[in-house]
């Protein structure tokens, strides 16, 4: 989470947090029919509780709350607003590998500019996050809602059915070409049209983005603005870390209904589903504000990244946060105040120090420290106390040294990294 | 939050997070009647939604979820378990100064030992947090549920009314002595008993803890175990940073029903209510596990600390997290890829860099950077590009220098702290 945070900050995104719940009307109707069902709703309080009504709901993503914030604080926000937000969201989904009912999203969003530089900035930021975490084999899938609509129209799908077609297309990875064709069929799109669609949408493995865009130009015309947008994004991305990860994927549809322009997704070979995704959503703020505000965002799923990193054994050794560096043993009840004072001195020197809470046998205390992987124990027995010394035992080597009390913290500090 | 986290870690507490919601049965009945009403409840999903039933509820504090975790994972946890947890909790309370419906608690809890050293460890940890944040005038109020029950019994309040009496006593700060006497009265405790109680509970301003405990010994007998516990805690605390902040406050009752031993609260003169509080709760885990497990905890309220720090102007200048250090201007559309590349280089050197998104007039871009308090802007005009240079303008001084492109990041990095 620290790496995500620091990388986002290097890209000029500033932190924002929003409350866990929103008014239920703010969320309903923003995520499509499926999404509506997965929203956790909070019961009215007090006298209204018996009614069974819900007035609040838990965040389903970080994008809609941001749009609400933009609309609410429009006069206090700068002209361009780049924020990151790392907070949990909640979905009443069936749990699976890397899919939880509560999970952290790590979002970046840029408000106020229609420039393709925004998409590139965000693709570079998320690529940098993954590179920093040690990923090298991810792919940035890029497509455009306008391209999708253009191809659907060209294949003979009427505008009224574009939404349905995209929902079916979005499932391609899960249900395959035959499944999509069947879904098209149940939604009243003829077999022949479905076949034509799937042909147009397919991208040969390994095709370079430039070539895909060239083919697109042939299909939609070279002056098609969506194609031109993809061309510009691809060209600019070459100047960033996202450049050699990019692939135009005409099958990419993205489930959420609020996207209006470029759509993006980041995938690795060993995880079905994505590590994250995003896109341009120029109309969402307008649903709250009454006038449109250009916006684009990208969201990384923290737990999915952790699942893959864990399975690939990508976490460095000793990454356990905040683990104890030295345990002060308790010689007897009478020496408790002295143990507290020693712990206090060592903490003052920046060490992470625990005190064994009960005056049990020293062997038992050592065994406990060992079981907790604490590298050092400090012993102040009667002899040590009389001489102003502390015995420090390195449990990794078994080595024990009597150290002048004033030097004990420094002694541990210089040896903890061995 | 970083200071809280690091200080807790120096005391040997390890991080834990729990889900935002618990089964509703886990929370009900743990916070008293008032608390029950303030729990946010989540509507059943799917086909059950129409029933208006709630099956889940949002965390009301971090202690009950911890007790649930202890009971659930008893066989995987160490014999002594010290964890900290910094997460939001939710209460359907009426918002006021420093009181929100969603707020962060910063909890430490120690499980598995009955030693008074545990209470002292925690009092020292929270004192250290406040000292590190720059507080010097806080008071650690200390009392003991056993002492309260002893004093109530001595004043003639029957055991069946102890709970009621504590609820009334807990409001002393808000409603005054007359208010408490009235509350006693409505709960069937005679006027004379109420007066005797309030007399016994009062502690003269500035009385030293030792003296209060001596008086307690006279009232409850010197072999009273609760008094002995307070005496030991007070003696041991003298070896830590909590020592000179401690005050025995016999009025302190703490609202939550699960405390069984020492109770603690931390206050500052300029905030009604506390910055945090805690105590020993040896029976709570038993409500889930069927056998009691010794436990003690302390919770700091983040927003209350922030309210006081803000009002006292205690935050250091420039503490704004992640603010942009340099903004790369956009000369024209053709130079966009080059601006991205320059930003990328500077980010690689660890700087926080933003790019102006649209190719507007340079004056407008400068003005924007200035309004965002960005100290440096980078300009790559046609001349600079031809010569492999970057112009860096320090907006704080107006000074502008042409720097070789390879040295630009270093130039900004060495000057950003001025």
Image (cartoon, coloured by chain):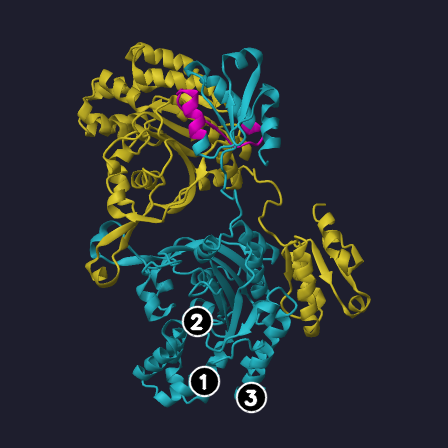
Chain colours: A yellow, B cyan
The alpha-carbon separation of the residues under discs 1 and 2 comes to 19 Å
Hey, which quadrant is residue A389 in on the image? Answer: bottom right
| Residue wearing tag 1 | B199
Would residue B310 be seen by someone viewing this image from the given angle? Answer: yes
Q: Is residue B18 visible?
A: no
Q: Give the chain of mark 2.
A: B
In the drawing, does residue A117 fall left or right of residue B279?
A: left
Residue range (magenta):
B347-369
Residue B289, relative to residue A167: is it above or below?
below
Residue toward you, A398 or B383: B383
Name the residue beneath numbered marker 3. Answer: B218
Bin the neighbour count of mark 1 within 10 Å (Cα to Cα): few under 14, some 14-19, many 20 and up: few
| Foreground tag (1 vs 3) | 1
- In the depicted view, which residue is nearer to us: A319 or B358? B358
The residue beneath circle 2 is B254
The C terminus of chain B, quarter of image: top right
């Amino acid at each position: 989470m620290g790496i995500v945070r620091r990388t986002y900050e290097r890209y000029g995104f500033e932190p924002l947090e929003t409350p866990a719940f929103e008014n239920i009307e703010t969320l309903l109707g923003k995520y499509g029919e499926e999404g509506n069902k997965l929203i956790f709703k909070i019961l009215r309080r007090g006298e209204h509780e018996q009614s069974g009504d819900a007035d609040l709901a838990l965040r389903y993503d970080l994008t809609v709350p941001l749009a609400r914030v933009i609309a609410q604080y429009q006069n206090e926000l700068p002209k361009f607003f780049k924020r990151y937000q790392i907070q949990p969201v909640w979905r009443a989904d069936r749990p699976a590998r890397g899919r939880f009912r509560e999970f952290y999203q790590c979002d970046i969003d840029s408000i106020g500019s229609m420039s393709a530089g925004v998409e590139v900035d965000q693709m570079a930021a998320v690529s940098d996050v993954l590179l920093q975490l040690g990923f090298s084999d991810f792919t940035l899938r890029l497509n455009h809602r306008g391209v999708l609509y253009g191809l659907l129209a060209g294949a003979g799908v009427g505008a009224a059915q574009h939404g349905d077609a995209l929902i079916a297309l979005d499932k391609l990875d899960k249900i395959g070409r035959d499944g999509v064709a069947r879904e098209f069929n149940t939604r009243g799109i003829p077999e022949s049209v479905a076949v034509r669609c799937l042909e147009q949408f397919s991208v040969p493995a390994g095709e370079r983005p430039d070539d895909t865009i060239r083919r697109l130009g042939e299909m939609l015309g070279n002056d098609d603005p969506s194609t031109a947008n993809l061309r510009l994004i691809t060209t600019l991305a070459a100047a960033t870390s996202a450049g050699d990860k990019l692939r135009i994927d005409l099958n990419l549809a993205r489930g959420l209904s609020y996207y209006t322009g470029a759509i993006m997704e980041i995938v690795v070979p060993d995880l079905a589903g994505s590590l994250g995704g995003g896109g341009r959503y120029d109309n969402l703020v307008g649903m709250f504000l009454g006038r449109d505000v250009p916006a684009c965002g990208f969201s990384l799923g923290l737990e999915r990244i952790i699942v893959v990193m864990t399975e690939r054994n990508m976490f460095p050794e000793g990454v356990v946060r905040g683990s104890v560096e030295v345990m002060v043993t308790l010689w007897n009840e009478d020496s408790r105040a002295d143990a507290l004072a020693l712990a206090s001195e060592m903490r003052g020197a920046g060490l992470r120090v625990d005190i064994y809470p009960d005056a049990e046998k020293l062997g038992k205390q050592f065994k406990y420290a060992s079981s907790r992987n604490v590298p050092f124990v400090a012993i102040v027995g009667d002899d040590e106390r009389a001489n102003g010394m502390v015995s420090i035992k390195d449990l990794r080597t078994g080595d024990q040294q009597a150290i002048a009390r004033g030097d004990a913290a420094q002694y541990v500090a210089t040896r903890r990294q061995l």
